[in-house]
Image: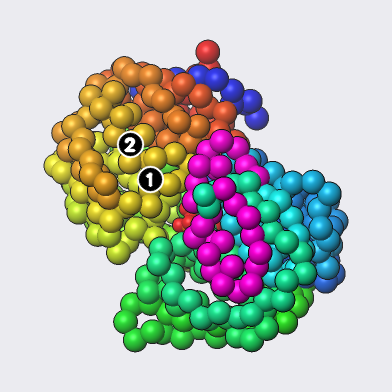
Amino acid sequence: MTALLGKLTANETGPLRGVTTAPGDKSISHRGLIFGALAEGVSEISGLLEGEDVLRTAAAMRAVGADIERQGGRWIVRGGRWVTPERAIYFGNSGTGARLVIGAAAGAGIGATFDGDQSLRSRPMGRVLEPLRLMGVEASANDGSLPVEIQAGRELLAINCKLSTPSAQVKSAILLAGLGAKGTTRVHEPVLCRDHTERMLSAFGVQLEIAADGEDGRFISLEGGQRLKPSNVMVPGDPSSAAFIAVAAVITPGSDITIKNVLINPLRAGVYETLREMGADITFDNKREECGEPIADIHVRHSVLRGVDVPAVRAPSMIDEYPILAIAASMAIGETKMLGIEELRVKESDRIAAVEAGLVACGVDVESGEDWLRVRGQGKAPPGSAVIKTQHDHRIAMSFLILGGVAQKPVEIDDASMIATSYPGFVETMSALGGKITGD
Ligand code: S3P
């Protein structure tokens, strides 16, 4: 696998063709390791994403006492009671790892300090710490950001809370803390967001109650004091990673590709729905279910795209896919407006700003506001010929490498190293399909 260090340049490609796979789903991989470490006994995970973010979660689980080893393509996790780690747990760039493990550690009753890289230190942690404090967790934090320290041995009481931000990370942290709280923890999510925690907790033997709230949301309740039972997890391909390859095929003339075994959970598939509305020829073939999650082979052919309005309500189901959707929009005929996306300002980078700056540099007509982005596509390849500042954000890096494959002149990214956080084989996969991405 290429060490993705430094600059990379994407050059215009011919048609992309072939059958490929996407790396294991990042959300499910984190949860598989954490839930395996909470369960008393041996759990096995196959298809785990071996990207940096997930490997940090594996290291975190070892630090709290789990025994984790890789045997061939499988990961064996021996979990049980958590212990206070000897030093601060470092999550690098991973918001999911940090937020979920803070909740799980609170529920497990251990004390610990959590930290991350410069980008993670600037991301909001108050959204997790506030509900945990209401449950009785004693947590110190600088202005609601990492490093965060939580104290051991506090008795937690269940809470009833409503999510003010549709965040699966926050929902998961509360539910995981709720496992160690007295009483029934109930989370109200007025806007549905990814439900892998609920699905996987059930697979690990936890009783949850899920009820509609009478409008578009739901209530998720669980009784404290439940222990997880070991389970085997098969991690499907990540639809967020697959979206880069899918968009590359949609916008590159003559392309026809299949991405096998991809998660198509409707709470993750918003980008595919949007691309279809834009005119993309994308089908989900061979639909099936594995480990409680729907999967399919995604078949994509080059298509002429038209601009659309992407409604705010769809944001949680495609929250990580706006950068790559903006690339698709730059090739579409007419305007694409993405609404209700303020959450993008607090991801691995300010993604609205990073996408806008990159598209402007590539000669695309783009405009933004606090919570929206508008891209005016010309129905043809943009000029390109730019060096993109990735802001240490993997999804910005991959998005602009895809744009470089169709732009009139090459597109260079200033730093490819972060791609390894979620998609270590990205360049190889693109090359195998016919892409032309080169190093210095
Ligand atoms: C994730 C939830 C999302 C997403 C992240 C993974 C998860 O974040 O952006 O990449 O695994 O729960 P939020 O829940 O904060 O929106």
Position in image of residue 164 (x %, y %): 40, 67
Apparent side of residue 175 relative to residue 373 in the rendered image (left or right) = right
Q: Nearer the viewer, residue 296 or 371?
A: 371
Label of residue 365 in the image: none
Label 1 with label 2: CB-CB less than 8 Å: yes
Q: Is residue 285 visible?
A: no
Identity of the residue drawn at 83% across and 71% down: 40
Task: Point out the stretch of residues depicted in magenta.
Answer: 115-142
Query: Which kind of residue does numbered mark 2 sit on?
Result: Ala
Position in image of residue 253 (x %, y %): 30, 34
Q: Between disc 1 and disc 2, whose residue precedes?
A: 1
Q: Which residue is mark 2?
A: 353
Label of residue 345 in the image: 1
Q: Residues within 10 Å of mark 1 (few under 14, many from 20)?
A: some
Q: Is residue 271 visible?
A: yes
Apparent side of residue 351 relative to residue 291 in the rendered image (left or right) = left
Q: Nearer the viewer, residue 63 or 111?
A: 111
Position in image of residue 282 (x %, y %): 35, 53
Q: What colour scheme was applied to this rendering of the protein? A: rainbow
User: Outermost residue toward the top?
Assistant: 440
Position in image of residue 320 (x %, y %): 43, 49
Task: Please tell me whether mark 2 sits on a helix, a strand or a loop.
Answer: helix
